[in-house]
Amino acid sequence: MSTPEINADINAGINADIDADLDAGTSDQQDGRERLVVVGNGMAATRLVEQLVANGYPGHVTVLGDEEVPAYNRILLSAVLEGTHDRDAITLRRGDWFAEHGIDLRLGSRVLAVDRDYGDVMLVDGTTIPFDRLVLATGSIPTLPPMRGLIRHDGSLHPRVHAFRSVADCEGLDEAVTARPGSRAVVVGGGLLGLQVARALSLRGLQVEVVEATEHLLSRQVDEAGAKVLRRSLTKLGTTVYTGARVTRLVDPPSGGSVTDDGPVGLQLDNGFVLETDLVVLTAGGRPSTALARGAGLEVRRGIVVDDTLTSVTDGRISAIGDCAQHGGVVHGFVAPAWEQASVLANRLCGGDVTHAGSRVVARLRATDLDVAVLGDPVGADGEVVEVSNPLAGKHSRLVVQDGRIVAASLVGDLSRVGIITQHYDHGTVLGIKEHGDLLLPDVVPTPTVLPDEAEVCACAGVTAGAIRACTSLEHVKESTRATTGCGGCANACRDLLAEKLGAPVGGTGGTRPHAAFTTA
Amino acid sequence: MTTLSTGPDTTVNTHCPYCSLQCGMKLQPGRAAGRPTLEVLPWAEFPVNEGGLCRKGWTSTGLRGSRERLTTPLVRDRETGALAAATWDEALDLVAGRIAGIQDEHGKDGVAIFGGGGLTNEKAYQLGKFARVALGTSQIDYNGRWCMSSAASAGTRTFGVDRGLPFPLADVEQADLVLLVGSNMAETMPPAARHLDRCRDNGGKVVVIDPRVTSTAERADVVVQPVPGTDLVLALGLLHLVIAGGHVDTEYVESRTHGFQAVADSVAAWWPERVERVTGVSADELRALADLVVSTRRVMILTARGAEQHATGSDTVLAWLDLALALGLPGRPFAGYGCLTGQGNGQGGREHGQKNDQLPGYRMLVDPAAREHVAGVWGVDPDSLPGPGRSAYELLDALGTDAGPKALLVFGSNIVVSSPNATHVEDRLNSLDLLVVCDIVMSETAAMADVVLPVTQWAEETGTMTNLEGRVILRRQAVAPPRGVHSDLDVISGLAERLKAPITFSTDPEEVFEELGRASAGGKADYAGISYERIDAEQGVFWPCPSPAHPGTPRMFTERFAHPDGRARMHVVEHRGTAEPVDAEYPLHLTTGRILAQYQSGAQTRRITDLPDDGAFLEMHPVLAARLGIADGDPVTVSTRRGRLQAPARVVPTIRHDTVFAPFHWLGVNRLTNDALDPASRMPEFKVCAAAVEAQA
C-alpha cells in the first residue's frame, strides 16, 4: 500500500461495485483488513500462501486459480504420465486447507483484467475483486511452434497434438496413450521437459522420436559434448533424436491417407523429413504469462519487471513472483527460485524487510534412466572448466570454477557425486586445487593390507590383532580376550586373522559384510 | 543403608553403570592379596545383552578403591578459594543455611536443581519431590533434556505416550528391515548390535543413516550419508515416494490415525531431486531406499541422538513417525518406531518428576488432577506445588541473572562438559552465590562448586533403572560404599530435614520405589504393580504395569494408542534448516558424538585406567585434509562462533567431505556447539553447527 490517499480513493471508487458483486468483498471492506489478491494457484502462489499462513499474515487473502483443480506439483506431471506417481499424490493444498485458514480460494477463476485506477481485478464472468495488494503469480504458458495445421479454426489444438503444461494436458495425453497402446509419438522440443516426456512415453510403451530445433539437446543447459553423450544414451534407450530441425507443418501421413482427427499424421521438418506419428507433444519452451500485467500498464520486458522486494517497478501495490517475474534481468522457469521469491514476498507482506538477491538454480532431469544435473549456467558462466568425458561409458561432467568455487556444472550420465557437488555449489565452498578434478573421478578402492600386531581389532574389548593371532580358535579368542562377545562386529576380522595363521577358513556366521550401497560424499 | 539380599561375598545380579542398554552383569566381591576386589562376570540369561559387555562394562569396577573417588564432603574456603574437607553435618548445615538465606532474599525460585539421566528412579523421584516440597522451587530440570527429549516430545504428540522402544530390543531380530537414523549403536551400546546381526542372519536388512560410516554403518546393508541436520527432509522425501507409489497402508491410516491427508499434501512438495539438493543424498539413492522400505512389512525405524539433537529435532522425529504411520508400522509385530535412548536411566529419569513440567508417572504439572493425586501421595496441599519451571539449558542460561536462580544443586551431571555453548554455561555457574555438586569423583563441574558432596556409585547402592525398552530393572548393592560416602537419597533427606520440610524423605530405596509406584499409579508411566521381587523374578518388568496381577507391557500400541480416542496423530512438519548454516567464514558442518571407550562427559570412564583416554580429536575426510594441508595426527584448530578447540586430526574416508566430527567426552568440545533450542523439546542443537578448521602453524 503506497499512501493513505490512494487507499481512500480506491475505497471511494469501488464501493458501489463491491456492494453489487461481492459479498466477501463487502465484509472485508467493513473489517478494514488489508485485502490481498493472488492471481494464480500454481506452485509459486501456493508457497506464498503457505508462508503467509506460517507468518501470520493479518489481511484477507483471495486466491484466483484458472484451473479447476486444487494446487498441484506441476513438475511431477511427467512422473504421473510415466505412471510412477499417483495423480492424487501431487496435490499440494486442497480446498479445505484454504478454508481452514480463512483464505478465499476460487478455482476456475480466470482473470480478465487488472484495473490499477480502481484497484481491482475483473474475472471473465464480470466479477470484480478489489485489492490493496496484488500478487501476480501467473506462471508461464507453452510456446507453440509456428507450424501450419496446428491450430484449428475454433482455436483448439489439432486432436493429435498435445501441449504439456497443466494437469489437464497430462490427463489428455494419458488418455491418448491409453487409447492407443504401442503407438508412435513425436516430442517437439529437446529441453528438460521434452526429454522427461519422451522418457515417460517410452516407458509407457510408445515409439518415441524427439525433434529439437537447436543443434543439440538441452542446448540451454549442457555443452555439445554432453549433449552428444545424452543423445547416445537416448538412442540406446530406443528413442530417435533429430536436432537442428524445426517442425513446419502437419501434413498427410507418408504411409498414405490424409490428416484426420483420429488417424496418423505427418510432421514436416524443415530439413525435408516427414515423420509419421500418432501423437505430437509440444514441449518447446514456455514464455512468461504477462498479458494481465501488460494490459494493466506495468513494465514488462520478458517478464514482469520487479525490484529486490519483488514489487513491480511501475506500481508499489503489485508484486510478481515465479515464472512470470523478471528480477535482476532474469526470468527463471524453475520451482526453487519461485519458492525463494514467494518466501521473500510473504516475509515483506507480513512486515518483514527481507530482500531477494537472486537464486542459484539446480536443474535436474527427472527421467528414468537418463541422469542429468545442471547447476547454474554451465554454458554461459565465466571461469575455468574442469571436465571429465567418457562418451563410451555415457558420461560427461563439466565444472566451471572461479577462485576455487564451483559456479556452474553439468553432469551427464554420472550422478554419483551430485549430492556433494550441489552442496559445494550452493554454499560457494572454496575447494582445493585437485579437488574439482577428483570430484569427477571414481573413488580409488584401497587394497587390503596386513594388520600389524598392535592394530586394535575388537574395539569393545580392546583386543589387538596380535592377541587374536595368539589364539588357536574362535572359542579360544572369546574365552581369553572377550573379542567378538561385545558387539560382535570383529567376528569376521578375527576369523580372517585366524585363517591367515592356520591357512584355512574358519567357520561361523555373522559379522561385517560388504555394503550394498554407499553415498559418496 | 538397605539390607543386602545376598551375603557380602556372594555374586550379585545387577546392571552396567553406563548406557541405556543397562546390560545385565554379575558382580562378585572377593579378596586378593589382602585387598577387597570386585569382579565383573557375565549374566548370560539377561536377554538384552546375553552376557555380552563392552570394555566399559568389563572395566566398570575400576573406580572401586581408586584414589579418584571423593570420600569426604568438601567446602570452598572463601578466603583462600580452596576446597577443604568438612564433615557431613558441617557441609549439609552450610548448604541448608545458604539455601534458606538465598530463598529469603530471592524467593523460592532462587534455588534450582539440575538432575541427571543416570540417577536411579528412586533418586529422580525423590529429587523432584525435594524440589517441589522441601525447596518449593519450580526450577528443576535435568540433562536428559539433552538426550532423548526430542523423541519424547514427538512420541507424546504422536502416540500420546513416550516410551523409547515400544517393544523389546530383541524384536529387532525378527524385523525385515531396520532403519537406524542417527544411531551408532555398535559403538554407543555395543552389545545391542548382536540383535542387528541376527536380524541380518534371519534375512533382514539394515540401513544406517549417518553423516559418518560408523562401526554400525559398517555392518549395514545400505548406508546413507546425509548432510548433518537434514534427516527430516530425508523422511519427508521417503514419505513422498511411499505415497506417490501407492504404498500407504490405507486401512491402517483410516482406522488408527488422524491427519494423514494434510501430511500427504505437504510432502507433495518433497520430490526426490529437491530432497537431493537439501540432503546431499542423490535422488537415485532415495528411490532405492524407498523401494526397500515398501518391499517388506516388518519395518523398524529407530532414531537416536543424530536425528534428535537438533533445534529441529522433535520435528525430525515427527517426520519419521509420519512415515512409520503411513506404512502402518506402529503396533505391527516386529515393526514400528522406537527411540534408542542414551543415558543409563534416560527412560526412567524422565518419568518421575525431575523434568521441569512433570510429576511422577509422566503426569503434567499443570494438570490439576495430577497435582491432586501426587500431592495426596506426598501428604501435602496440591496448591503448595509450584508450577513448571525453566528447561535445562534455559535454566543454566538464567543462573545468576537478575531473574534467575542464585543457587544450583547438581546431582549426577557434569554440566560444564556436557552443555552446549559451554563457556557461557561456565560463566553462568561462576556467577552463582552457591553451587553444590554431588558426584563420585572431582568432575569438571564439581571442581567449580562451593560444596562438593561425595556420593555412592552403582555397586554400592540399590535402586531401579528403566532401560531403553521401558523395562524396569534392579541394580542390587554388591559392596559397601567407601567410608565417608553417602547416597544421594541421604543428601536429599538430610537437606530436607534441615530445611524443615513438611514431610520426611525416606533413604530406603525399596520404600521409595513403593511410594513412587503409588505416585505413578494411573499415570502414563504406571509403576504401581512393579516390585523389587517381581523385577528379580521376571528379569525386569515393562511399564505400564498398573497392578501386581498385571503382566507388564512389553509391546505397546498393538490395539490402540494412548490418546483418548486411541488414534495416533500425524503432523505436518516443515524443513527449517539448521540454526547456523555454513558460510564463507565457517564453511564446515561440525557434528559431535561418542566413542566406544568413553561414556558421556567422561567423568567416570576417563578415570578408569583400563580404558584408553586419548583425548578429543577431529575427524575429517582426506579430501578436506588435503584442501587444508593437514595430515593424519596433525594438530588442528577447530573454531565456531562460540569457541576454539585444539586437537589432533583423524583423517578418515568414512566421513562426508563437508563435515568434521569431534567426540564430546572431553572439556572443550561443547564450547563449540550451538545452544539454539528446539521450540518443543528445548533440545540444543548439539549435532550441527558451522565451523572452520585450520592447521596449526
Image (cartoon, coloured by chain):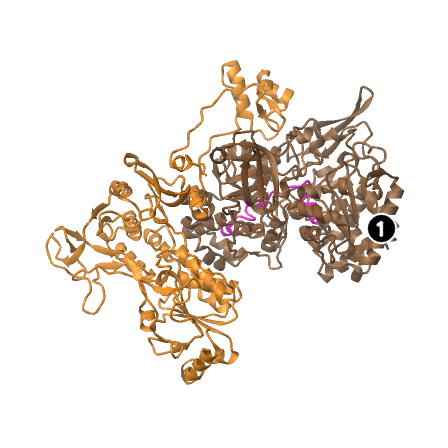
Which x, y percent locates residue B117? 70, 44
Please name the residue shown 35% across and 68% down the image.
A66
Where B379 falls versus A469 (above or below)? below
Neighbor class of circle 1 (other Cα within 10 Å; few <14, some 14-19, many 20+) is some
Which x, y percent locates residue B135? 81, 54
Chain B rendered in what hue? brown
- Report the span colored magenta: B322-351
The amino acid type, in three-letter code, at marker 1 is Arg
Q: Which residue lies furthest to the bottom in this view?
A: A16
Give the image quarter of residue A294: bottom left
Q: Residue furthest left?
A: A256
Asked if one can make out residue B168 in the rendered structure from this viewpoint, the answer is: no
The residue closer to the viewer here, A358 or B168, is A358
Where A15 falls versus A84 (above or below)? below
Please name the residue shown 79% across and 37% down the image.
B456
Q: Which chain is orange?
A: A
Please name the residue shown 41% across and 32% down the image.
A443
The residue singled out by tag 1 in the image is B98
Whether residue B691 is in magenta: the answer is no
Please name the residue shown 43% across and 58% down the image.
A339
The residue closer to the viewer here, B9 or B538, is B9
